[in-house]
Image: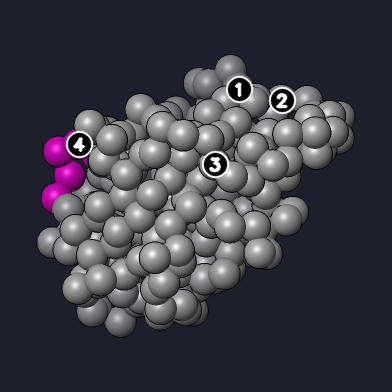
Amino acid sequence: MSFDLPRNVILPVDAIDVRLDPGPHPFARDNKQAVAENWQREIAAKPALFDGTVVLLSQLAYRDNRLVGRCHAVNYSTFMLWRKRRENSGAEHAYAHAMLVAGDNALVAIRMGSHTVNAGRVYFAAGSFEPDDFRDGLVDVDFNMIREVREETGLDLSAARRGVRWHALSTTRGTVIFRRYHVDEPADEIARRISAFVAGETDPEIDGPVIIRHAGDLPDGLALHMKPLIEWHFSGVG
């Protein structure tokens, strides 16, 4: 199977069958020394980095509106080396976005904090899948979305109305799985709540909220994968 899915097109996704393999990822197994050396350089540049656990894919395919794949738990230090060697690595990255839709149809994204790897980048609150996001070995994408939004913004989306299905956008740099989450309040009120949460945090992960009101409203620092997602939302499809 390896990596077999259309690239650079938004795909409807009715089911996600991505499973956690308990064995080591071949990339991690084959690059232990390089991982350790690169990590020393990374933490010298950004001392706040934490070598936690995330997952990397070894397989992903799109079949009959389903994402089917396999992933392995790796240290964040392994992930950081992979970011520099992703071509022909036998590994890919998948992550999830809760597309936060305000009552006035604006989108509410976030700008990452200066101490993070993606400092200044704008995208929807998100984080890599972690082993805790899996149930009986199967990834729970919505659990990941809700957890990450709560951790970064203080918002609880567990009772929010969700889009009827997921969608995915895959590029050579990774696959984002996303879903609309509708909140009744207007965007300005949601942004106020996020800003208040960030102000009360000792070490916030984000700088604050970013409101996107139409397809041409593209803020500075916007992550590359975000433009097609924004255009998709404001086109009214899905």
Q: Which residue is mark 4?
A: 158
Task: State yes or no: discs 1 and 2 in contact (Cβ < 8 Å).
Answer: yes
Quarter holding residue 15:
bottom left
Q: Residues within 10 Å of mark 1 (few under 14, many from 20)?
A: few
Q: Earlier in the sequence, mark 2 or mark 4?
A: 2
Q: Residues within 10 Å of mark 2 (few under 14, many from 20)?
A: few
Tell me the element at label 2: loop
Per the rendering, the mark at residue 203 is 1
Visible residue check, residue 194: no
Per the rendering, the mark at residue 6 is none
Residue type, numbered disc 2: Ala
Boundaries of the magenta span: 157-161
The residues tagged by marks 1 and 3 sit, at their Cα atoms, a distance apart of 32 Å
The residues tagged by marks 2 and 3 sit, at their Cα atoms, a distance apart of 26 Å
SS majority, magenta: loop
Is residue 202 within the magenta segment?
no
> Is 134 placed left or right of 23 in the picture?
left
